[in-house]
Image (spheres, rainbow, N blue to C red):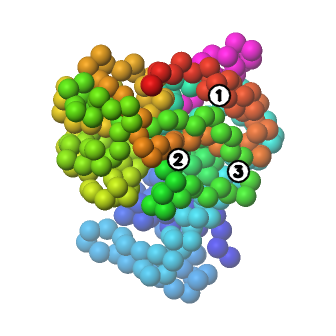
Amino acid sequence: MIEIKHLRLVQALASAGSLSGAARQLGYSQPAVTQQLQKLEAELNTPLLTRTTTGVHLTSAGEVLLRHGASVLSSVSLARAEVDAVAGLRAGQVRVTSFASAAATLLPGAFAAVSQAHPGLSFTLVEALPEESLDILRNGECDLAVVYHYASGSSNDEPAPLAFTDEVSTELLEENVYVALPRSHPASAKARVTLNDLADDHWIAGCPSCRGNLVNSCEVAGFSPDIAFETDDYVALQRLVAAGLGVAMVTDIMLAAARPDSDLVLRRLSPAPVRTVRVVSSQSLLRVPGVRQTIDALSAAAGGLDLVTVD
């Protein structure tokens, strides 16, 4: 019989590379780890470890347990989180993951509104990209994930992440995506700009997801962007554009988080891409005290966002 403790043991052995290291990770003595390993190998009638001068390594059978164990342990963690939610064991705390510009614009007001109405509630926040945020949610390590997805209507668009059966997704807003230009750029005189107008420019790219959208959009337009700078800091991105070092794509939330520099010009793109921002949770996690209220507060914050006007 393979038990959860066995899967945790194999995971610790693979991670630590030694019996003593695995024992420390699991909080056991080394003899206890050795005994548990020997019993498991006897049960399965096959060795799970090989010992070398550099430490211990999993055999092929051990690798099979490691691979299947990763998904099993993830499911167990999520199940425990949802059971805790139902039982109210996390009452008073809402755990949120979000991308940076939403954390700077939507979350402060939403957290403040919920805290004012329910003083006993507290929040934790982890910044992460959308794919990472969804993984954190599905591993049972947060209650809400604020994520986004780009779309331009092209067949090259990245597909929206598939929702798990129990997941609940609430759209917060649909952002415009603009091109940011230095005021001296020839295209700044146009009301609308196409990507082909910028094919010969240097580009300043943002986070990996934003960079992926930029590359896909430019490839649809028939060229590969010359990415001269990469930064996850949306303030630095705007300043680099304003300094004449390149052009960049920016969204409503990025501009709300950091108002545009006077030497920076914003122009609408044609065709016009959009970025949809949503908050994801699960039916079970909605029973956590404060989660539903936080979703409602995020929707209100998105509706009241002070956006930059672009003609």
For label 1, the SS is helix
Q: Gap in Å between the C-alphas at discs 3 and 2?
A: 16 Å
Q: The residue under label 1 is which amino acid type? A: Leu
The residue positioned farthest toward the bottom in the image shown: 45
Q: Gap in Å between the C-alphas at discs 1 and 3?
A: 17 Å
Are discs 3 and 2 less than 8 Å apart at CB?
no
Query: Which of the two residues, 255 or 110, is positioned nearer the viewer here?
Result: 255
**Start and end of the magenta stretch?**
108-127
Q: If the image is split into quadrants, where does the N terminus sit?
A: bottom right
**Residue 196 position in % (x across, y down):** 30, 49
Q: Which residue is mark 1?
A: 298
Q: Earlier in the sequence, mark 3 or mark 2?
A: 2
**Residue 120 position in % (x across, y down):** 72, 18
Compared with residue 287, is residue 154 higher up or lower down, i.e. above or below?
below
Query: Which of the two residues, 139 or 4, is positioned nearer the viewer here?
Result: 139
Mark toward the viewer: 2 or 1: 2
Are discs 1 and 3 less than 8 Å apart at CB?
no
Q: Gap in Å between the C-alphas at discs 2 and 1?
A: 17 Å
For label 3, the SS is strand
Q: Please tell me in which quadrant of the rendered image residue 192 appears.
A: top left
Q: The residue under label 2 is which amino acid type? A: His
The residue positioned 59% from the left and 64% from the top of the image is 71
Q: Which residue is mark 3?
A: 167
Compared with residue 261, is residue 195 higher up or lower down, i.e. above or below?
below
